[in-house]
Image (cartoon, rainbow, N blue to C red):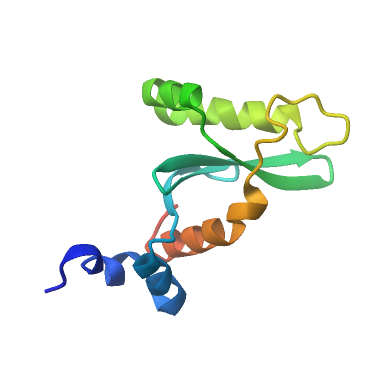
Amino acid sequence: MKTGIYKNVDKVFSGPEGALNTLLGVFMKVIDHQRAAWFLFEHEGNLYLDANCSHSAFSYCYMIKLSAEELAEFKIGGHEYLDKLAYDIHYSAPAVKGSTSKYIGRDVSNKLSELSSTAIQLWRNEGGGQ
């Protein structure tokens, strides 16, 4: 029987990259999602919302670390609050030139893209999103 940090390695992560990241403590987990709109991730005790933004032919993901205020709102509103927050991010167009979005400067997509991609792949392998 596996104990300690090793007990869930095989269940949660498959393949050498996932197992290595787990053993090193470097992993991200999908907590919730809304199809084609957003993912909520947990990483190192923080929550991150990855909003799918689309403006005509220009599409991108914009991931933010939830602030203390956003965390408090999430605790109250749950999934519906995240729908609203992702909508606000999308319609504020933070990556569009000339945008005055209040989310500008909060994007961590590039920093966490590899971890989030791995988390989504593992989540899907486990039947997430079905």
Spot occupied by residue 103 in the image (x, y as percentages of width and height): 68, 30
Q: What residue appears at the point 78 percent right and 39 percent down from the top-left corner?
A: 95
> Where's the N terminus, which quadrant?
bottom left
> Please, which residue is most extreme toward the front here?
24
Q: Which residue corresponds to the image point at 43% horizontal and 50% vertical from the top-left?
A: 30
Q: In the rendered view, tell whether residue 127 sits above or below residue 108.
A: below
- Taking the view exactly as shown, the residue that stands out farthest to the left is 1
Residue 51: name its quadrant.
top right
Q: How many marks?
A: 0
Q: Residue furthest bottom?
A: 16
Q: Residue at x 60, y 45 (%)?
A: 36
Between 25 and 47, which is closer to the camera in this rendering? 25
Q: Residue at x 82, y 45 (%)?
A: 58
Q: Where's residue 48, x and y in %? A: 51, 41
For the C terminus, give its image quadrant.
bottom left
Quadrant in the rendering for residue 105: top right
In the depicted structure, whether residue 111 falls above or below residue 118: above
The location of residue 93, given as percent across then percent down, is 76, 32
Q: Is residue 96 left or right of residue 11?
A: right
Horizontally, residue 86 falls left or right of residue 11, namely right
In the rendering, at what x and y percent does residue 47 appear? Answer: 46, 40
- In the picture, measured across the screen, residue 120 lies left or right of residue 96, that is left
Q: Is residue 50 above or below residue 13?
A: above
